Amino acid sequence: MPKRRKGANLSRRTTNSTVMRDIRARIQQNNTDVRASMAQLREARDERNQQRQLERRETRRFIVNRRRGIDQQRQQLLRAFTSDSFLRLAFQYEPDVEYYAHSKVVIGSLDKECPHCHALKFKNEPVGMCCSSGKVQLTEIETPPEPLHGLLIGTDPDSSLFLKSIRTFNSCFQMTSFGATEIVNNIAANGQQFNSTFKIKGQIYHKVGSLLPMPNESHKFLQIYFMGGEDSERALANRVDARCDYHNLNSPFARRIVTHLDALLNENNELLKLFKSHMHKLQSDNHAIVINPDRTPAGEHVRRFNAPVVDDVAGIMVGDRTATRQIVIRRRNNNLQFISDTHRSYDALQYPLIFWKGQDGYCVNIKQRDPVTGAETNKNVSSKDFYSYRLMIRSGRDNIILRCRELSQQFMVDMYVKIESERLRYLRYNQQKLRPEEYIHLRDAIAKNADTAEIGNSVILPSSYVGSPRHMQEYIQDAMTFVREYGRPCLFITFTCNPKWQEITSLLLPGQNAIHRHDITERVFKQKLKSLISFITKLHVFGPTRCWMYSVEWQKRGLPHAHILIWFVDKIRAEDIDSLISAEIPDPSTDQLLFDIVTTNMIHGPCGILNRSSPCMVDRKCTKRFPKDFINDTVTHIDGYPIYRRRSTENGGQSFIKTISNADIDIDNRWVVPHSPLLSKTFNAHINVESCSSVKSIKYICKYVNKGSDMAVFRIENTNVNAPPLNENDEMANDDDRPNWPVYQFQ
Ligand SMILES: [Zn+2]
Ligand SMILES: [Zn+2]
């Protein structure tokens, strides 16, 4: 209501005022209407908001519920993974549990970077394995120029041919000859030869001849580089002919590769340049080029390029007297000189395709460095540390050694022998510290009036020398102590590396197989083995353990495997065997994953009439006695292994079709290798689990566990445990089966 003005005449009614009053009333009405509709709108909005809030709350509740449901589900799935509940898990295997995804089982990926050298490692690998925590600092091997780079990484059209025969191409250019006491041909039990891993027996030696061949003899090795012709083109053609003829390389593609590489090495290899620049100074056949074995101390030439330069040549000299480790290459003679494996050019002369520039390898005076200041210390880098550094995968860098397939295998074996020789040399020169006269076997031998002359010359390998007879013997003693103390072991497990593990395949470079990368297969296997051992002995999936032991071996085909013996606090009861060990194909409708794992990893052969060329066949019989018989119930024998349940398809057993040489073969339970469903599911590999139920099997098992890779252990075990191993030094040189396990400090 408008306020009444003071002194206004209220009784006066004019048309004007009536109109005004009407207008005012209308406005008032309008205002009221607007207010009402506003209120309506507000109400509607509030209602809508409330509705929305409700909906939102509802959604949130739904999401929370769902998440809670998933969590509950997950908790149900992970029930077995909470602490303590691993106990005796193997007896309660459940198909829907993701055992393999648990953090105590996964080994992680190669993503831990060393702060010093940027090497990539698994979470449980030792800190110092790449560069001894920054103490080893080496110059990288530079990326080679084209076409070698393209041939190695696969961008060159001739790359696949080159990589397939890389050892042959390397031998076309090697300047020293490669020899070993024996280069082992891989022959399977059925007499068939296969070629997968490079193996040698005994000592490796590299030899170098003279720069020029004797009259009427053809050019070999280093000599080919000095073959001439009327002009440079003719000379190149002559060299290529000589290289290709010698190695039976007939295809035009191979010739093209050899031609390109010849030019590349002549242009870049510092050793060749050195030989060529000094060749004309050799006035007679008796003159020689001499290369010093060790690097010039770094103090004199700080940060210099590490390929040999002219300054490092001891001299052009005549006569016979030279220091022991020097390389002396005469202009012409008939002799071959052994190259000391600690000469810095040992690697470059043999592997010109890896050390294309003639880069230095290991020599004895490489100094360790202070990780912080980078200054040299007075300690030397050992050959093991040197080559561990060389074989690492580093972030952002391409390691060409790891691209060389069969050639890198040869290189690793060669360097492994170098490392072993260095350790043996150390032991030989430090016998006083080892106090050989106090060794019990030696004393025993003397006491028994053995031929002391024979003993007097031997070099004592302490038991800390991994793989030595004394080391193996300690293993046997341990095993025997366990057996004496606790009776027979309860389980005998064989764990074999699976080259299809995602951890391995994800690290292979394009075009590579696991067989090309022993560095990866070994490192992954080592991590998986650690995980398996802790699964059994720390998480006690088979129950509390009393003691255990294992040994790692190299298979003929180059896949590592471990033999594990375990003694439990509670012996496995006969009625528990079926829940623990299965020799049957799982039902794919309830456990597809285990079905896949068992059918790919745990099926023997097939051999016999189905496949006579199977590696297990000797004299037309399977050495592992497959196929086994069908049996409806497990029988535990008083003497020997139990006979596990293997039901036929009529009695509810499973079967599947396997294709071998284009023929479909029906595989049933007779072919299944005994396994633990829990271990198979968790580790996805060939894991043979056997229950030991007799004393008779112990001898076999101990032999298995302790044979290592040298024969001496057999002898000790089979005859007299206390007999001194004969000629230990020779035995050790034979230890060739483990190319780079010790290189990575795994022992
Ligand atoms: Zn490092
Ligand atoms: Zn067989």
Image: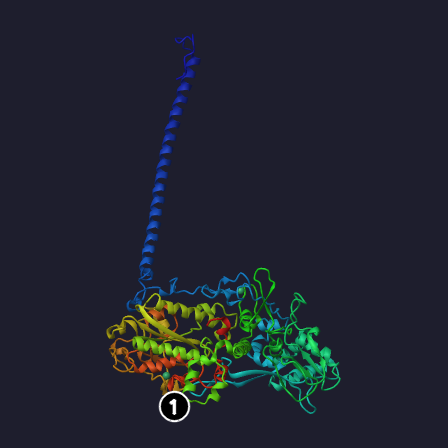
**Residue behind label 1 places its C-beta within 8 angstroms of ligand 2:** no
Instruction: Say whether residue 227 is left or right of residue 394.
Output: right
- Quadrant assignment, res 484: bottom left
Residue 717: x and y in percent read 38, 84
Residue 111 or 508: which is nearer the viewer? 111
Mark 1, secondary structure of its residue:
loop
Residue 676: x and y in percent read 32, 72
Instruction: Say whether residue 369 is left or right of residue 40.
Output: right
Residue 36 or 482: which is nearer the viewer? 482
Residue 196 or 359: which is nearer the viewer? 359
Under mark 1, the amino acid is Asp
Whether residue 691 can be seen here: no
Q: Relative to 34, say whether 576 is above or below.
A: below
Q: How many marks?
A: 1
Residue 125: x and y in percent read 46, 66
**Quadrant of the image for the N terminus?**
top left
Residue that carries the numbered disc 1 in the rendered image: 619
Q: Could you classify mark 1 by the number of other residues whose Cα lies within 10 Å: few (under 14), some (14-19), or many (20 or more)?
A: few
